Amino acid sequence: MKRKILSIMLTFALVFSLMAGCGTKSSNNGESNSTATATKSVKITLLNSKGEIQAQLEDAAKAFTKENPNITVEVIPAAAGQSPFEKVTSMYASGNAPTMAMLDPGDIAKFKDKFLDLSSEKWVSDAIDGALNAATVDGKVIAFPFAVEGYGLIYNKAVLDKAYGGNFDPSSIKTRDALEEAFKKVEATGAKALEISPMDWSLGAHFLSITYADQSKDPAQVAQFLSDLKAGKVDLANNKVFNGLMDTFDMMKKHNIDKNDPLSPTYDRGPELIGKGEVGFWFMGNWAWPQIKEFDTANGQYGFIPVPISNSQDDYGNSGIPVGVTKFIGIDKTQNSAEQQGAAKKFLDWLVYSSTGQDMLVNKLNIIPAFKNITLQPQDPLAKSILQYVKSGNTLEFMTTLPPDHWSKLGASMQKYLAGKIDRKGLINEIENYWKNVQ
């Protein structure tokens, strides 16, 4: 995905666009199947791999059924700690494939023989530029781009305002030293600086992947770097970006509220700490807003700052956060009936084109949509912060097509590093060995 084009289109779609939704491609298959579901009750299932919005997705399913009484949608959660790919694979093996499966971008192509061709759906024409890249396999669109997301260091502005004795300017933090100064200022107020959530997916898929994204502004150069890693041609011990990122991580470890037992916290601890103002920062993404909101009793302000990799504010990456389409939904064609497939298409259309569906997507699920016809402005502060980075062009490549086991295997390596069970040399060894063995 080209970051520059994505930035322009996201800005156009979500900030300045006044366009009404209309596509040029017809969805004849969806129309005929929708007609079938109009006179016949049908139940469909959605495998949800975004556990933080399980309750909100269930509410969206109920709202859809209220408007489409003959269609019932069951939202099935993927187990915590289980990759979506593993969950869906096991469901296929048991002959109980979900009608719709929410997967990571890198997993879509693996189901090309099981997912329905959606190329003729109306929303294909309304997708923002680049949003369908990972969903297009052998010239066919086989998945629906569900969410645009971004991540970095979430800050609680009230905590930072107190620490700085005035109006905190997030753009002032563009170096490692500036970040540590912010940590120390927060700690001087009696609060803690930072929460590092130790989940393997956060450490492996998100934090470590900044190493790849920050290698170059040019996506082709990033791809070449990964190719060189696979070929064993990269010496991470002498890679400036990697060492800079890990120097920052070492500094973050010193200010981690849970530094004495860094692997003990669960995901749920993060939103509580940042929402209650017990910490100033939390490394996480905008998907966490529904949980933060539950603890934010003061209607506070939140946003993102980048993870700096050096003390030179002009170094690439020090002013940007990763942004990209992170989740796709495929429709099964092998174990679900034509009526179920039609109902699933109708559900996706409902999200994109109905006022209720759009409201659910943007305001209830707190999703930044990947469609230019949706002009609703997100109200949550983290989505707004992401859009500010998009508008300014300060976005990094969200590494969404890494190998499926990257987050679990190298996330485990990052956990060991976080806990002090391996040093940097050991971490480098595990990272390089992992990439050399990627098939």
Image: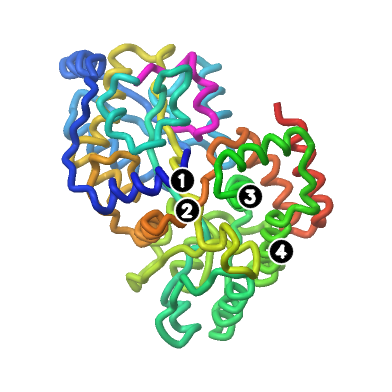
Q: Which mark is residue 215?
A: 3
Label count reads 4
The amino acid type found where label 1 is placed reads Arg
Above or below, 398 relative to 117: below
> If you read the primary sequence from the N terminus, does the residue marked by circle 2 or circle 3 appear first?
3
> If you read the primary sequence from the N terminus, does the residue marked by circle 1 or circle 4 appear first?
1
| Residue 408 location (% of width, % of height) | 65, 40
- Tell us which disc is closer to us: 1 or 4: 1
Tell me the CA gap for discs 2 and 3.
13 Å
Per the rendered image, the range of residues in magenta is: 102-118
Tell me the CA gap for discs 4 and 2.
22 Å
Which residue position holds label 2? Answer: 395
Q: Quadrant of residue 61 in the image?
A: top left
| Residue 100 location (% of width, % of height) | 39, 26
The amino acid type found where label 3 is placed reads Gln
Q: Quick one: label 1, few (<14), some, or many (20+) residues within 10 Å?
A: many
Which residue position holds label 1? Answer: 3
- Tell us which disc is closer to us: 4 or 2: 2
